[in-house]
């Protein structure tokens, strides 16, 4: 949830290949172009359809986006000016990834699975 519905929807369509399947001033339903089962709802956190106890902006959220070429995505998103909160790196538990954020501070972990190493091989 956000106070910047249009800006947030534009961010995901511009940088992560989502498309709007429904748009209103208070709600945008986004769908991944590559997989229609992947959907995001961007909505005004103060809208009347949200119970009063749940209103506000999102916090403490991390989205994982798995990609085929994480090195390409890192270059592309860095060149686009997105904040890089965790630089591209390999993890022993089996990920090559980096972390950026959307305009609301929602963390986005862009991931390419890789073979695990060390203690994680047998898990």
Image (cartoon, grey):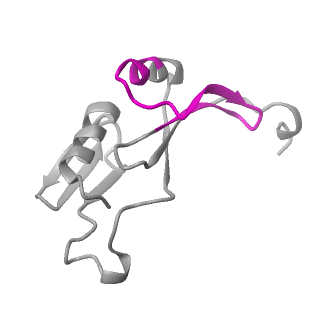
Q: Is residue 54 above or below residue 66?
A: below
Q: Toward which corner of the image does residue 41 lie, by quadrant?
A: bottom left
Residue drawn at x 40%, y 24% is: 77
Split into 4 quadrants, where in the image is the C terminus? top right
x, y percentage for residue 73? 45, 23
Asked whether 49 or 33 is in front, the reply is 49
Asked whether 58 or 33 is in front, the reply is 58
Split into 4 quadrants, where in the image is the N terminus? bottom left
Q: Is residue 73 above or below residue 118?
A: above
Residue 55 visible in the picture: yes
Image-based side of 9 in relation to 16, left or right: left
Q: Is residue 71 above or below residue 47?
A: above
Residue drawn at x 34%, y 22% is: 80
Q: Is residue 26 above or below residue 48?
A: above
x, y percentage for residue 46? 24, 70
Residue drawn at x 23%, y 55% is: 29
């Amino acid at each position: 949830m956000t106070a910047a519905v249009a800006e947030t929807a534009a961010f995901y369509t511009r940088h992560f290949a989502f498309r709007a399947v429904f748009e209103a001033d208070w709600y945008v339903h986004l769908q991944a172009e590559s997989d229609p089962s992947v959907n995001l709802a961007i909505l005004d956190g103060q809208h009347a359809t949200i119970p009063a106890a749940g209103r506000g902006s999102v916090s403490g959220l991390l989205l994982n986006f798995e990609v085929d070429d994480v090195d390409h995505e890192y270059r592309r998103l860095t060149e686009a000016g997105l904040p890089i909160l965790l630089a591209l790196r390999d993890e022993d538990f089996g990920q090559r990834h980096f972390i950026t954020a959307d305009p609301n501070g929602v963390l986005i972990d862009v991931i390419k699975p890789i073979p695990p190493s060390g203690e994680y091989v047998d898990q």
